[in-house]
């Protein structure tokens, strides 16, 4: 991304049309904590990226500071690089919303970005570091609609009449899922005003969504990208084709958009995903499909209850003290009632069985047989 900003930062969107690299930049931008900087949906004004950065830096230096909710340490440098470029510096940000509700198991954030070619990009944030955010993602396995998907539809329907310009919408990880879901379920007039939908290594959907008339209506507008070793982007069903992108990282680290390779005007394509990715995805898909909705829900709820009892609130908690956190989770597991322990043991046993069944096929492919 930073290379692209150096290469193309001096060219506006009228001279060089919007392309997939711009999409991942705006999708990444949505992870920044911009509370109190970018006007919300009920405010008329917007703010340029250039001005937003100046306020952002002032707030970071203040005694109170800004608490970043993103996984990505590069985000502050990204928005500063954007501010210093002709292409992005004058883009206007508005309609920022950032919601977190533990009781509803909701984590949702979105932002609108005006570009110089008289379009608006609506960027939905992916999952943050909170355990609730990850729990909400896993709820997609058994729910027809999760709270953030409902919020995405409401947000798009609220903002679209105010924007009155052609829309591009997208996001990274869960954000891409929200973009597709919102487009599939919004008012028909709004849907017709959407020119492109970008999904960047995003999980799929419950089959109910894939079979809906709304999804069918927007399917041809979807640009879906996954890295070579994608895991999250292969989760659940997608119902559309995707392009495989080269990354300079390995394994799960390829999920980061900062690792995706770019050319001057595009993402660098790969022929196909890696064999390890195909193995993991086939295993997870077979395992999930072998569980009915009720069983999926029981397993996820039981696992979440045990992790919550261990006082783990975020991925950061796990990273700070991995051994301590794992010890607490195991202690919580031992304290759980026998029915929950039996459910978790049996469900994980089926996962390992699916992995073992596919492993021989994986080795044969790997060895060229």
Image (spheres, helix red, strand yellow):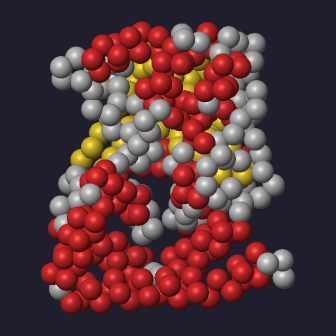
The residue sitting at 30% across, 58% down in the picture is: 318
* Total labels drawn: 0
Find residue 108 and report its image quarter: top left
**Quarter of the image where the C terminus is located:** bottom right
- Image quarter in which the N terminus is found: top right
Left/right of residue 313 with respect to residue 110 in the rendered view: left
Residue nearest the observer in this picture, 25 or 369:
369
Note whether residue 342 is visible.
Answer: yes
Q: What residue is at 64 percent from the left and 83 percent from the top?
A: 359
Q: Residue 233 is drawn in which quadrant?
A: bottom right
Q: Nearer the viewer, residue 132 or 276?
A: 276
Residue 53, horizontal then vertical, whole percent: 41, 15
User: For the point 25% across and 64% down, which residue is it?
Assistant: 325
**Image coordinates for residue 293, horizontal then vertical, percent:** 42, 76
Q: Is residue 277 above or below residue 354?
A: above
| Residue 94 vs residue 351, the one in the foreground | 351
Q: Point out residue 184 in the picture as x, y percentages from the top left corner.
A: 56, 48
Evaluate whether residue 202 shows in this view. no
Camera-side residue of 155 and 76:
76
Where 100 falls versus 144 (above or below)?
A: above
Task: Identify which residue is drawn at 44% across, 39% down.
Answer: 72
Relative placement, left or right, of 274 versus 81 is right
- The percent coordinates of residue 15 (x first, y second) are 75, 13
* Residue at the extreme right: 369
Does 344 sit above or below residue 75? Answer: below
């Amino acid at each position: 991304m930073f290379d692209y900003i150096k290469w193309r930062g001096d060219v506006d969107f009228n001279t060089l049309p919007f392309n997939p690299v711009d999409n991942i930049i705006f999708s990444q931008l949505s992870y920044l904590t911009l509370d109190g900087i970018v006007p919300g949906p009920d405010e008329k004004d917007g703010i340029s990226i250039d001005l937003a950065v100046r306020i952002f830096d002032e707030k970071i230096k203040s005694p109170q500071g800004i608490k970043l909710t993103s996984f990505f340490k590069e985000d502050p440098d990204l928005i500063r690089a954007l501010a210093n470029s002709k292409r992005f510096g004058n883009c206007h940000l508005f309609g920022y919303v950032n919601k977190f509700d533990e009781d509803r198991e909701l984590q949702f954030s979105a932002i609108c970005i005006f570009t110089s070619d008289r379009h608006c990009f609506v960027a939905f944030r992916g999952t943050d570091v909170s355990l609730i955010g990850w729990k909400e993602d896993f709820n997609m396995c058994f729910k027809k609609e999760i709270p953030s998907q409902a919020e995405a539809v409401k947000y798009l329907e609220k903002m679209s009449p105010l924007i009155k310009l052609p829309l591009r919408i997208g996001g990274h990880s869960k954000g891409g899922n929200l973009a597709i879901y919102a487009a599939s379920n919004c008012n028909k007039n709004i849907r017709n005003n959407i020119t492109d939908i970008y999904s960047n290594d995003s999980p799929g959907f419950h089959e109910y969504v894939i079979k809906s008339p709304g999804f069918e209506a927007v399917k041809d507008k979807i640009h879906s990208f996954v890295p070579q070793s994608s895991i999250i982007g292969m989760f659940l069903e997608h119902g559309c084709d995707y392009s495989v992108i080269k990354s300079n990282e390995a394994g799960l680290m390829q999920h980061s958009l900062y690792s995706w390779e770019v050319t001057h005007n595009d993402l660098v394509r790969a022929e196909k995903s890696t064999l390890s990715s195909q193995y993991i995805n086939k295993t997870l898909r077979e395992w999930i499909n072998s569980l009915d909705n009720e069983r999926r829900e029981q397993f996820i709820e039981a696992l979440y209850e045990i992790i919550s009892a261990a006082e783990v609130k975020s991925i950061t908690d796990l990273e700070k003290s991995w051994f301590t956190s794992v010890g607490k989770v195991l202690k919580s597991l031992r304290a759980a009632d026998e029915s929950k322990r039996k459910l978790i043991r049996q469900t994980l046993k089926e996962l390992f069985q699916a992995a073992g069944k596919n492993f021989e096929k994986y080795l044969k492919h790997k060895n060229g047989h």
